[in-house]
Structures are given as structure tokens and as C-alpha cells.
Amino acid sequence: MPVEAKDVIMTGGCSHALDLCIQVIANRGQNILVPKPGFSIYKTLANSLGIHCKYYSLLPDKDWQVDLEDLESQIDGLTAAIVVNNPSNPCGSVFTRRHLEEILQVAEDNYVPIIADEIYAHFVFSGHEFYPIASLTTKVPVLSCGGLTKRFLIPGWRMGWITIHDRNDIFKEVRLGLTALTQRILGPNSLVQAAIPKILTQIPQKYFDDTLAILQRNAEIGYNALCNVPGLKPVMPAGAMYMMVGLEMDRFPAFGNDLEFTEKMVEEQSVFCLPTQCFAYSNYFRIVLTVPEEKLVEACERITEFCHNHYTHGDEVNGEASIYGLKDIGSIE
Ligand SMILES: Cc1ncc(COP(=O)(O)O)c(C=O)c1O
């Protein structure tokens, strides 16, 4: 179903779009459900309004799909919306059509609307496909947030939008509320607004293809460089700009958690990766794939050296070889 002008609200970036959606849909004391691991801004925005965040789990061994049972179990009488971020920051995952339908079913069964953060809609690697979640439902009302930031690589231009998908007129008051909120502060700047028709229609496709090719190539380089490093378990992304790298923390006993690991890595190797504590998750760090290839290669070499320097074999941890079992001991040889 084509989106009409009345269904689009311009904002000062995707964060502003998310801010307006959370403000309009939830009241103080209510909660929104957000992914774990997930982008921290949902919590920052919600908490500043007295709205709670409840976390639903994403499953690393299932391409970071939503744990649907966990999602449903988090819904209570005060749940105002489910935030779905696809493709994901920090996971780099892209949900299949089938999986999005499963999420929608949970929302529909429980009468909870969706706030879709689809800012990475155009960053999907070959072999995967992006489906706007609103295109897969006629029942669940969806506020979809997007913007120019990622696709056009212009974070400072502060231009985003909300598209309202509401086939059953459930969002009448939400529409009024969104309009009222956009009048408090004029987020989108006029110069970029004027340029939008050209930006959206006249940038050669090659620009987007080249950007995506760089991201995908960097994902492959990063994954291949780190997948055999002792103590690391990178998860190959399907889109966005990021790759998650799992940490076998018990192999790095010098560090209590992913924050300590990444802090020491900056100190010793000058490589900065975000610990997943920043995403309400633990024992991973996140790599950004937008850097030039030679820098990524060098960073991965330094990460590898760091791991070799701090990795402790099973028989050295607590002095007990047997705690890791035969498989791990075998791999040491
Ligand atoms: C998942 C996600 N949503 C929203 C944003 C914010 O985008 P903007 O710069 O347009 O506010 C980001 C930026 O990193 C992001 O990763």
C-alpha cells in the first residue's frame, strides 16, 4: 500500500522520529519493549519521559532472531509498544519475512502496536532481503522510523521521518499527537528539506551499490580475520554496518567483563570497539564496518595480537584442565 503525504511526518533525524513515537504512544509509568542487545537510545529516550524499558532477547545462535516466547512474556497491562529494529544495530541481522510475521502475530494477539526502527533498510547484504514490517500486516498499527543518515552517510544533516501505517484507524489520536509534537520544535532543517526530492531521486545507484559492496566486503574481511582467533566468536552480519564478536570470557581471566576487555584493548592496541554492555548485553563487542579496508585489516591484526597475549588455555584457568572438557583441550594442540 503506497504511503500518502498525510502519513509522513518529517523529523530532525531518526532519533528525533523515535523520540516522537515513544512520547506519543506511551505515558509516564507505562513500558515499551526493546531488543537486547539493542541500540541504547530507546532507553535514554523512554527513561527521560518516565517510561520504562522491558527487554526481550535476541538469539545469537539463531541469526539474532527474536525469542518470541520471551517477547510475549514481557508484555503486560502497561505495555504501550514493541520496538523492532531491523536491520539491527548492533547485531547486523536482517529478519526474514517469516520471522517478521511471527513478531507481528505476537503484537496482534496482544493488541500492542509496533515502533519500527528501519534506519538501516537499505543496508542489506546479497542473499538477504529487507521487508518493511508494516508491509506484512493489515491489522497491527505501525510507526516506522527512517531517515537519510545511514543510506546517504550524512548523520549531521539531521533529517528523518515517521511513516504512519494504520489501516484500521486505531491511531487517530496518535496522529494528532504526532502533529502537535512536531510543532513544539521544528526538527527538520529547511535546506535539507528542500533538497530531499533531489537526494531521493537523483543520486546514481552506483553510489549505493558501492557503499553496500564496501560494507559487505568489510564484513567478510572482519569475519575471516577473527573467526579463528582463540577466544573470539564473530557472528557474520547480514546487513547494517556492524559485526558482533562473542567473547569466551573464561579464556580471558584478566578481565571481568566485555568493558574491561575493550578498555584494555584501547590501551594496548589503540583499537576501540564498543563493549556490548552499551547495548544491554554482555560478553560481546561490536565492530563498525565503515572504516577503510586497510584500517580494518590492521585493526583485526591488533585484536588478534591482543587476544593471543591475553588468552589463557583451559589447563591454565584455575589450574583445572578438566573444566573445559575434551573438545577444548583437543583444540589446544
Ligand atoms: C538503530 C538506530 N536507530 C536510529 C539511529 C539514529 O539515527 P539518526 O542519526 O538519524 O538520528 C541510529 C544511529 O546510529 C541507529 O543505529
Image (spheres, grey):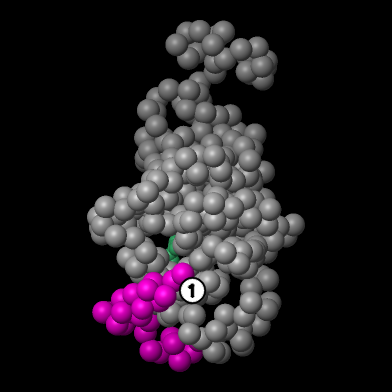
Q: Relative to the observer, which residue lies in front, 181 or 328?
A: 181
x and y percentages locating residue 301 in the rendered image:
56, 42
Q: Residue at x 63, y 40 (%)?
A: 62
Q: Name which residue type carries label 1.
A: Asp
Outermost residue, right side: 127
x and y percentages locating residue 125 in the rendered image:
68, 59
Q: Residue at x 66, y 20 (%)?
A: 331
**Location of the C terminus (image quadrant):** top right
Q: Residue at x 59, y 53 (%)?
A: 105
With respect to residue 121, does 2 lie above or below? below
x and y percentages locating residue 179 in the rendered image:
35, 80
Label 1 SS: loop
Quarter where residue 190 is shown = bottom left
Magenta segment's dominant SS is helix
Quarter where residue 27 is shown = bottom left
* Magenta stretch: includes residue 195: yes
The region drawn magenta spans 170-196
Q: Is residue 278 visible?
A: no
Q: Quadrant of ligand 1?
A: bottom left
* Magenta stretch: includes residue 77: no
x and y percentages locating residue 311 in the rendered image:
51, 25
Residue located beneath label 1 in the image: 169
Quarter where residue 268 is shown = top left
With respect to residue 154, does 61 lie above or below? above
Q: Residue at x 50, y 13 (%)?
A: 316
